[in-house]
Amino acid sequence: MSSPSSDLQVRATVGSRVGLHARPAALIAKAVAPLDATVTLAKAGGSPVSAASPLMIVSLGATCGEEVLIAAEGPQAERALADVRDLVERDLDATDGDG
């Protein structure tokens, strides 16, 4: 028997005004940490990096409007893809509150 979700992929467009910098990267890593899935992010033509590492996500240099490929494998791969896609596509810089 194979796992219900293995090696899924989805594309997402970066929504944060400043791209995938420290804050969005930390939120993405926090979201995938409790999940039973291995998740990676990659820019077109680039090598995938672990979504569990904020530093690796920042190293992509993904800017607002740029497309990234999100890949996941494992029992919770579908949930991981949905969660990460939501975070990548949201403008996480617009949720600062009081300013």
Image (spheres, helix red, strand yellow):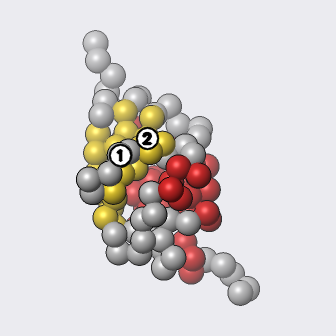
Residue 80 shows in this picture: no
Q: Residue at x 56, y 66 (%)?
A: 21
- Between 69 and 5, the one lying in front of the other is 69
Q: Residue 53, how many percent across, how many down? A: 57, 46
Task: Indicate whether 11 appears above or below 52.
Answer: below
The amino acid at mark 2 is Val
Mark 1 and mark 2: span between their CA atoms? 13 Å
Query: How many badges with numbers are in the image?
Result: 2
**Residue 71 picture quarter:** top left
Q: Residue furthest right?
A: 98
Q: Residue at x 54, y 72 (%)?
A: 92
Q: Residues within 10 Å of mark 1 (few under 14, many from 20)?
A: few
Q: Residue furthest top?
A: 1
**Residue 78 picture quarter:** top left
Q: Residues within 10 Å of mark 2 (few under 14, many from 20)?
A: many
Q: Is residue 84 left or right of residue 45?
A: right
The amino acid at mark 1 is Ser
**Is the residue under label 2 in contact with that under label 1 (CB below 8 Å)?**
no
- Between 99 and 69, the one lying in front of the other is 69
Q: Residue at x 50, y 31 (%)?
A: 36
The numbered mark, 1 or 2, whose residue comes first in the sequence reads 2
Q: Secondary structure at mark 1?
A: loop
Task: Indicate whether 8 appears above or below 36.
Answer: below
| Quadrant in the picture for the C terminus | bottom right
- Between 5 and 54, the one lying in front of the other is 54
Residue 25's label in the rendered image is none
Residue 47's label in the rendered image is 1
* Pointer 2 residue: 39
The mark lying in front, picked from 1 and 2, is: 1
**Residue 96 picture quarter:** bottom right
| Quadrant in the picture for the N terminus | top left
Residue 53 shows in this picture: yes
